[in-house]
Image (cartoon, rainbow, N blue to C red):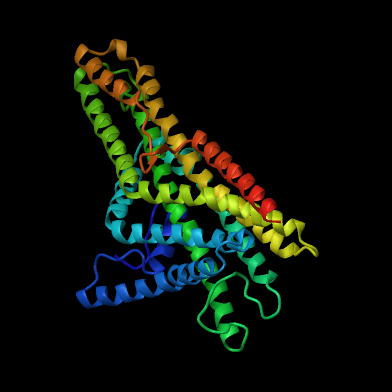
């Protein structure tokens, strides 16, 4: 196996290689010495990207505690880095399990040989296009955010608030600290996009596999020559294959739940706070005189970026629920009434199981759905109005 990872879905390939480039996916073919060096490399990037930011911004938060306006300007990125750190640690710990999920889905997509099935894989039945479009938008907003923050800093002022145990206004401390803030922002933003795309791509793969299963059930009684075949010798092997495929998809969905449930819960919890404080900070910037247009653009892009981050998970989880229940319709649409009693019973098992939607949850607390997305945005707005009232009372 080479260093670069390959996959049928190019957004997944891109994200996996970026995560591996910074050491957070450990290759399986390393020697003991190489593995030790890899862990040092991994630790360096974790500290550089998330560790330093969390320490210096947490320190600044302690020093300014009580000043709502300053606390908000520090905390919106602090919470983002905490969530990023948790997602990185999750991939480091569960990298092997994540790779197994990827390999399982890749094997089914690569081995598909039916003409209609190949068309589903090629077009990805809109899933691949959706992931790609979301990825483009996510990257655009991320780059716009970082550029806005980097360019909005005034002379001898760092782009972001933070506490350092040295004077950052003097050279070369200012240049070094500025470089770290901007470079760490760019790289950590790219990693954040990659980690979110990794999880949503895996959900999209499950959706594609469900569509291939639907195709198999629709063509259950159709032979290779297009003729109708309802005898057990032809139908039962296909039914058994469909049952195995259905169980495999459900198992993959369960593994995605096991691997990503806690990080998604952390992201959703943090996102409620981030959306709230970012909206508050944006409102402050809009009321400032003179207005820093570049910073306003950066803050606006960051706000939309955080909202999109939550929407990606909720949308893919919602679509997985919808498409998992469509298996029932596909099974019912085949000419089951012409099959034997044994075949009908086996088909009924699939229909009964697929009536229960395959759901992904955030830590078991809330289901990934569009309803969940709406609830998070509403909660963020509620916190935003509370912050405004607190600030008004302090004036």
Q: Which residue is painted at 66% across and 49% down in the image? A: 388
Give the camera-side residue of 390 and 304. 390
Q: Please give left or right for residue 31 compared with residue 104 in the image.
A: left
**Which picture quadrant has residue 341?**
top left
Q: Which residue is painted at 22% across and 78% down in the image? A: 33
Residue 218 in the image: x percent, y percent? 37, 23
Above or below, 28 against 372 in this view is below
Number of disc labels = 0
Above or below, 29 against 176 in this view is above
Q: Which residue is painted at 19% across and 15% down in the image? A: 342
Residue extending farthest bottom: 171
Q: Quadrant of the N terminus?
A: bottom left
Q: Which residue is painted at 33% across and 50% down in the image? A: 102
Give the camera-side residue of 121 and 180. 180
Residue 280 in the image: x percent, y percent? 65, 53
Give the camera-side residue of 155 and 253. 155
Residue 98 in the image: x percent, y percent? 32, 53
Tell me if I can see residue 137 in this picture: no
Give the camera-side residue of 88 and 234. 88
Q: Quadrant of the C terminus?
A: bottom right
Residue 2 in the image: x percent, y percent? 32, 67
Q: Please give left or right for residue 161 compared with residue 207 in the image.
A: right
Q: Please give left or right for residue 36 compared with residue 272 in the image.
A: left
**Which picture quadrant has residue 228?**
top left
Tell me if I can see residue 265 in this picture: yes
Residue extending farthest right: 290
């Amino acid at each position: 196996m080479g260093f670069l990872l390959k996959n049928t879905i190019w957004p997944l390939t891109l994200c996996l290689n970026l995560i591996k480039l910074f050491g957070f996916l450990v290759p399986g073919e390393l020697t003991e010495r190489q593995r030790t060096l890899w862990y040092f490399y991994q630790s360096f990037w974790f500290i550089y990207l998330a560790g330093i930011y969390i320490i210096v911004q947490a320190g600044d938060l302690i020093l300014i505690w009580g000043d709502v306006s300053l606390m908000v300007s520090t905390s919106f990125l602090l919470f983002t880095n905490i969530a990023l750190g948790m997602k990185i640690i999750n991939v480091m710990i569960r990298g092997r399990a994540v790779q197994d999920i990827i390999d399982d889905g890749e094997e089914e997509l690569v081995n598909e040989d039916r003409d209609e099935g190949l068309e589903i894989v090629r077009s990805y039945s809109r899933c691949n296009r959706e992931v790609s479009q979301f990825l483009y938008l996510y990257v655009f907003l991320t780059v716009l955010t970082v550029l806005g923050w980097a360019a909005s800093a005034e002379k001898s002022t760092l782009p972001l608030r933070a506490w350092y145990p040295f004077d950052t206004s003097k050279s070369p401390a200012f240049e070094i600290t500025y470089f770290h803030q901007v470079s760490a922002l760019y790289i950590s933003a790219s990693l954040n996009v990659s980690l979110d795309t990794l999880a949503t791509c895996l959900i999209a793969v499950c959706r594609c596999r469900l569509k291939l299963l639907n195709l198999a059930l629709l063509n259950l009684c159709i032979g290779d020559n297009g003729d109708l075949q309802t005898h057990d010798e032809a139908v039962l092997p296909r039914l058994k294959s469909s049952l195995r495929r259905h169980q495999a998809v459900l198992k993959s969905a369960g593994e995605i739940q096991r691997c990503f449930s806690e990080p998604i819960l952390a992201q959703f919890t943090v996102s409620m706070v981030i959306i709230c404080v970012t909206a508050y900070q944006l409102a402050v910037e809009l009321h400032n005189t003179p207005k820093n247009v570049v910073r306003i653009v950066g803050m606006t892009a960051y706000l939309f970026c955080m909202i999109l981050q939550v929407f990606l998970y909720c949308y893919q989880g919602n679509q997985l629920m919808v498409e998992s229940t469509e298996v029932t319709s596909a099974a019912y649409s085949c000419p089951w009434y012409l099959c034997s009693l044994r075949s009908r019973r086996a088909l009924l098992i699939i229909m009964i199981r697929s009536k229960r939607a395959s759901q992904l949850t955030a830590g078991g607390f809330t289901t990934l759905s569009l309803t969940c997305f709406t609830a998070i945005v509403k909660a963020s707005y509620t916190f935003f109005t509370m912050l405004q009232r607190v600030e008004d009372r302090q004036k």
